Image: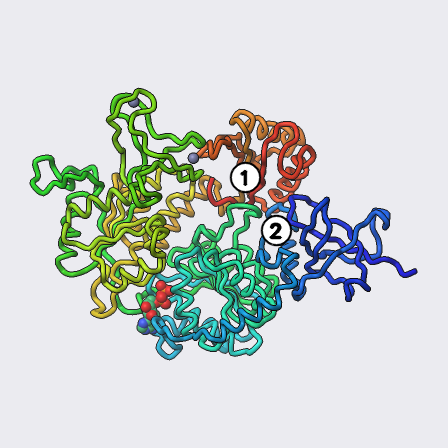
Amino acid sequence: MTTPIVVQIVVDKPLPQGFDYLWDEARLGCLPQIGHIVEIPFGRGKEVGIVTKVSAHSEYEFDKLRSIEKIAPLPLLDGALLKLMNFASQYYVHALGETIMPSIPKMWRKSEDWDKIPKKLESAAKKKAKEKNGEFVEGYITADQLNQEQSNALESLVGEANKQKNGFRAILMQGQTGSGKTAVFLNWLASILQDETAQVLLLVPEINLTPQLERRVRAYFPNEILAVLHSGVTEKERGVAWYEAMTGKARIILGTRLAALTPIPNLRAIVVDEEHDPSYKQQEGTRYSARDLAIWRAHDQKIPILLSSATPSLETWMAAKAGRYEYLRLDQRAQGALLPKVHLVNSRDPQNQFSPGDKNSPKTKSLITKTLANAISKNLEVGKQSLILINRRGYAPVLSCNACTWLSVCTQCSSHMVMHKAGALGKKSVLSCHHCGLVKPIPSFCPDCGNADLKTLGQGTQKLEDAIEEMWPNARVLRVDTDSSRKSKGAETLFQEIHDGKVDIVVGTQMIAKGHDYQNIGLVAVLDADSRLYSPDFRAAERLFAQLVQVAGRAGRSGTDGQEGGDIYIETQYPEAAVYQYLLRHDVDGFLSHTAREREEAQLPPYSYQGLIHAEGKTLDKAIQFLSGLKGRLKNKGLLSKELRVYDPVPKAVMRVAGSERAQLVIESESRKLLQEVLELIDQDLRADSQGRISKTSRIRWLIERDPIAI
Ligand code: ADP
Ligand code: ZN
Ligand code: ZN
């Protein structure tokens, strides 16, 4: 009798261990290999899992083991990818199976559909053959057309002098919006792809940036198959793209954070565009940073990685300053346009406000000050477009009663329900909770006192749109937010209307500001910038600064006359705040140095490393008790010290969501290694009394997060 073959399988469950199964070579038609995707019987059902070990032994009796049912019609997950997954699983303290499995497209995780797959691939290939690449040529700048600064940058990436540097390189390319960074990295990737087997990975933030960049990439590589992976593609498209990446057919993999975990056997270079963008951080399941994993992957595979941004994250910028990363700078705007002029409008100053007696004073009250209104009128007169940003979608952030203290609070969350006007979320006006999604009709009377006089407080995009239509009745106004783009037209159609000059004033959320290359914007206004400074998160200012620089980059991109810098207006009650003062001078490095000093004094990241323990349950008390209990045990083990700081548990900023109450505990250390050890210890400690990640005694759902970006 031959010795049975035992394989270890991991599945998408929060279980630290794998499971042993028997491999019947005769039945399955081949020997097992690490990286095989297989179907297994699991409990009373089936699961799809990955082979992570092959041996002739098991701790269990062979006749107790069950057998592998089927093998997926797919190549193996390659060794380099599994190594990356192992690292991610360990670093982010999540099971290997629950790290790998969600990165595999759904289409491949349904074993009952495996038989149909060859057919699906065939039809997708036929469809693709009809598609044409390279018809769209905006932004197609060849290597000879690069300006001096860009050529220098490209030279240091590809030049002879660097040929010897074969292997891992991390490079920060910092340059203001419009300085031609994209043109540089696309030319760099083109030179790498001259090697006919090479594949490259281009990561972009979520999501409305992708179509534009995709067109540009297609213009550069008319004959290449692109694997496009983001939340906007269908499951089937994603399945096919992933397959084409793992078989080497697609040589360019373009996608959002999940794409960082794609199997790419011949990966030769990685670009992370807008590397500072918070959307690179996964906020559920294994909470990885796609940028950080991409850097690890480049290091492990000994290939170069380019991080591109106008406002690098403090982490990356400090690494470049310290010489750990190479540092490329683009300091001019490629098409010669000037930087926009920044105006800080002090909204507390009466001179900037409409006064009650003013005959121009609009009936619809809004956040638009008189100073800003005048500037918008002037901008209209010269035939330029204005972009007005407010961070709140909906009509008004809260509805209130005029007679008592009633406010439209969500019954399931500790947050207000936002009023949306008819047409946005339904036929009638509604109240909607942006945290749990609950939608309710607008009450005709106050639920507390019966008063019929309900009024709105504050303003969102819809109310602002009304105010603008009243103030400039002849202007063509367009609102861009997730409501308007969900309704009839997709975001792309709305952006196209701006491009085509069909609108004069655009009002919208941050969504308008990302990466789009509008040509005729003369003025950009930000109305509620301060609201983002109130956040308790220590990264609030860094994030606001990055957003404002992005936004400013929308103004004056016009290259035709090469002169117009455009204007950006920021309404604020705190014009003296550092974030605005550095913005006024377009001083990105100054702001980052300033921020670095603040973080150093407070020993906050990147001067220390953090872990976050989340706890969620029926009541806040229970969640806090659960975390206090954990802290107590850490203390008893003698783990609390100056080197390892464990803070007291606190309620989360939005404490109640969808009926659960939530608390968190921050752990901080200057030593990555120490933090890692303690997080692993906590994982063991909590698992001892848990089923999955739910505590058996207190029914608290818990989660460990490494390097949180929002606290
Ligand atoms: P970034 O990525 O830094 O925002 P882009 O590469 O998108 O910059 O360039 C901004 C604009 O300038 C684009 O419209 C691009 O086509 C154009 N551009 C870039 N490089 C050049 C160049 N060397 N000559 C002329 N136009 C350029
Ligand atoms: Zn009332
Ligand atoms: Zn809610």
Left/right placement of residue 112 relative to residue 469 reads right
Residue 93 placement (x, y as % from top left): 62, 45
Q: Amino acid at mark 1?
A: Leu
Give the labeled residue for mark 2: 99
* Residue located 68% across and 59% down the image: 37
Q: Earlier in the sequence, mark 1 or mark 2?
A: 2
Report which quarter residue 16 is drawn in. Answer: top right
Dot 2 crowding, Cα within 10 Å, few <14, some 14–19, many 20+: many
Q: Please state the quadrant of the image where ligand 2 appears.
A: top left
For mark 2, give the secondary structure. helix
Residue 409, placed above or below residue 34: above
* Residue located 32% across and 49% down the image: 509
Residues 585 and 448: in front is 448
Q: Nearer the viewer, mark 1 or mark 2?
A: 2
Left/right placement of residue 140 relative to residue 639 reads left
Give the labeled residue for mark 1: 612
Location of the N terminus (image quadrant) = bottom right
Q: In the rendered structure, find residue 540 and report the number of the disc placed on it.
A: none
* Residue located 59% across and 52% down the image: 102
Do we see residue 295 in this rendering? Answer: no
Left/right placement of residue 403 relative to residue 663 reads left
Q: Amino acid at mark 2?
A: Thr
Residue 105 placement (x, y as % from top left): 57, 58
Do we see residue 241 in this rendering? Answer: yes
Residues 161 and 24: in front is 24
For mark 1, give the secondary structure. strand
